[in-house]
Image (cartoon, rainbow, N blue to C red):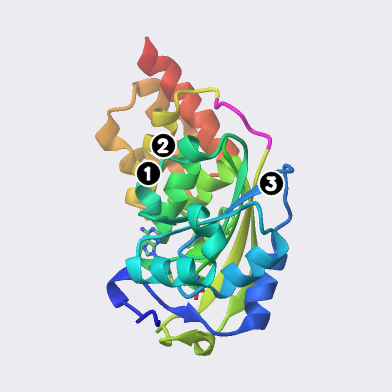
Amino acid sequence: MQVKPKKYLGQHFLKDRNIASKIVDSLSFHGDYKTLLEIGPGTGILTGILFDKYPDTTWLIDIDGESIEFLREKYPDKAEKIIKGDFLRMDLGDIFKNGIGIIGNFPYNISSQIFFKVLENRDKVSEVVGMVQREVALRIASDPGNKIYGILSVLLGTFYNIEYLFTVSPGVFYPVPKVKSAVIRLKRNGRRDLPCREDVFTKIVKQGFQNRRKTLRNALKILNLPKQISEMKILDLRAEQLSIDDFIELSSKIDVLWKK
Ligand code: SAH
């Protein structure tokens, strides 16, 4: 049987085995987790390598029934680890009791949502090795002071160490995508809880970048910040000029006043 590429599912199948091996070899098992979850195995080029190397600890989830049927036929003894479903709706805690690593050539149309889900499950997800659109990879891995530094760079960088690993050209996929790709690696860092409420932190970061060309004073106006805050010098800056620690410090100051 064959899996026909479906555009609405973001399907671009990798054809190059060397690149597939390079992606799998990028797993560092940081944090000593054992279990792996591959998101979007598709026709299984990564899966074959994963099942060879980690036969008892690899799980798959794909939303495409055709892909799942194909993989269950190819790996009948693994059927119970081959899940048909939407990763974005998957309850990770339900299946995985301990830390996991996530790997995949992700569906590019939902890559940001995948990373937001990783953030929500950060105490379960020790590591991510993922292929995404190159632009997205660059943004996520960007440092402050850069035009492409944004919400995901800050939120993910708060809880993960992020590395841009390598670029992949469009020609190694079928069908050939319009964009370049890249592989990034996220390793859970040592940060546990924030010193402020997390929703406050998220709100400040998101709102700050909403109008990224404005100073924070203007970008955050809509939040009606207390006067002590809006008079602070740091609000002369734009969101992209703040480090992660700056955002945490600012959010904590705001949270203290908001709690009063
Ligand atoms: N890993 C394969 C396929 C990548 S294409 C390869 O490298 O060749 C992306 C895959 O993600 C497709 O198989 C697609 O069906 C799957 N997918 C798309 N949306 C998904 C979702 N919400 N949850 C799980 N898998 C999804």
Please, is residue 58 above or below residue 165 in the view? Answer: above
Disc 1 marks a residue whose amino acid type is: Lys
Tell me if 187 is positioned left or right of 199 in this view. right
Calculate the distance from the C-alpha at mark 1 to the C-alpha at mark 2. Answer: 6 Å
- Circles 1 and 2 in contact, beta carbons < 8 Å: yes
Instruction: Write down the residue under mark 3.
Output: 34
Question: Which of 236/95 is in front?
Answer: 95
Please, is residue 185 above or below residue 92 in the view? Answer: below
Question: Which of 13/194 is in front?
Answer: 13
Q: Secondary structure at mark 3?
A: loop
Rendered location of residue 98, percent (x, y): 61, 36
Q: Mostly what secondary structure, the magenta segment? A: loop
Q: Quick check: is 144 in the magenta stretch?
A: no
Rendered location of residue 63, percent (x, y): 35, 61
* Picture quarter with the N terminus: bottom left
State the image quarter where residue 130 is shown. bottom right
Q: Residues within 10 Å of mark 2 (few under 14, many from 20)?
A: some
Q: Secondary structure at mark 1?
A: helix
State the image quarter where residue 85 is shown. bottom left
Tag in front: 3 or 2: 3
Rendered location of residue 119, percent (x, y): 49, 42
The boundaries of the magenta stretch are 190-194
Q: Residue at x 54, y 87 (%)?
A: 172
Q: Residue at x 40, y 16 (%)?
A: 257
* Picture quarter with the C terminus: top left
Disc 2 marks a residue whose amino acid type is: Thr
Instruction: Write down the residue under mark 2.
Output: 202
Instruction: Write down the residue under mark 1.
Output: 206
Question: Which of 70/255 is in front?
Answer: 70
Q: Residues within 10 Å of mark 1 (few under 14, many from 20)?
A: many
- Mark positioned earlier in the residue sequence (3 or 1): 3
